[in-house]
Structures are given as structure tokens and as C-alpha cells.
Amino acid sequence: MKRTLLHLIILLFISTPSYSIRLESSKVDGVTSLAIPTSSRIPHKQVQALTGRKLTLIEKIGLFLLHRNLRTEPLTEAQIKTANSNATLGLVFGILSIIVFPLFAIPGLILSNKAFFTEKVNPNTLTKGSLNAAKAGRITSWIGIGLLALIFAFILIIVAAYG
């Protein structure tokens, strides 16, 4: 059932001329970004009409996520700078989580993952240095989360022993 609906959605995007996706590329500072026009969005009511049945909640969520992951316009220069800054800040927070206080690991992990998501949606958005900083930020943040777990375990042992 899910596989059939997935095939239907893929066929709608690929084979039907009125729903075909036309990719437009744009260059910002030498970085090529692909954009999908907003006309490629298919409302769930049209999918229901094409399948002849109501979509389940999971199928509606899947269609929503499909629309959300398809970019409707290329990234602006400010968004590209923000993605590169997120990668760098993720690394800074990851290092601070090891050196100063492990609670800094949570924003470090969030910022690094945000940079990776931007890179996943729009390839070649991050510079090579920023991509490496995001990787290092993710690693150091996980180390910081491990240290935070060890601190909580140590506190629990102390409280249990002397509590």
C-alpha cells in the first residue's frame, strides 16, 4: 500500500507533464543551487482524487514532508552565510562542551545538524572548511553529551551512597 502510493507520487512528479518538475539552477558566489518551482506542489486532495481513496494520516504527513524537503527557491547569500556560520558555531560549542561545561553540547549538536541538513537539501552550500567544522562540531558535541551523561551518573552514585 505504502509502496504503491510512493510509486504514484514519483510517477506524478516524473511522467505527468502538468506535474513535472523543472529544475532551475542559480549561481551565488560560485555555488550552484537547484530550485523547484512552487507549481510542482501537489495538494493531498488531488492525490486522493487520483488514487480514488482518502489518504491516511501517515500518507498525508509523508506528502507534507516531501513538499517541505523540496526547495521552492534557491538559497540567498545570507542563508549560505548562515549555514557556514552554523557549522562554525557548532564546532565552537562542541569544543566548549568538552573544555568548559558539557551542557554546551546540545546547541553545538543542533547547529551542526542544521548545517548538515542545509548541505543535504542544497548540495555544495557549505565550503569545504565549514563542512569539516560541522563534522568536527558533531563529534565534539557527542563527546560533550557523553561527558554530561558521566557527570549525571556520578551525581546519582553520590546521592545514592550518601543520600
Image (spheres, rainbow, N blue to C red):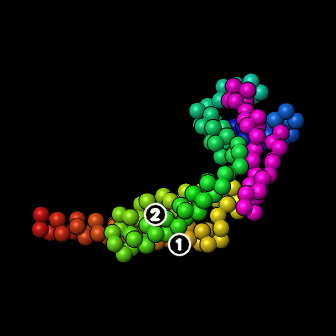
Q: Is residue 103 visible?
A: yes
> Amino acid under label 1?
Ala
Q: Which residues are magenta?
A: 20-48
Secondary element type, mark 1: helix
Please name the amino acid that badge 2 sits on: Gly
Q: Which residue: 34% across, 72% down? A: 100
Asked if the stretch drawn in magenta spans residue 36, the answer is yes
Separation of residues labelled 1 and 2 (CA atoms)? 10 Å
**Which percent across, then down, holds residue 154?**
25, 70
The answer to whether marks 1 and 2 mark residues whose Cβ atoms lie closer than 8 Å is: no
144 lies above or below 43: below
Q: Quadrant of the N terminus?
A: top right
Give the quarter of the image for residue 32.
Answer: bottom right
Where residue 45 sits in the image (x, y, percent)?
Answer: 69, 25
For the C terminus, give its image quadrant: bottom left
Residue in front for this viewpoint, 77 or 50:
77
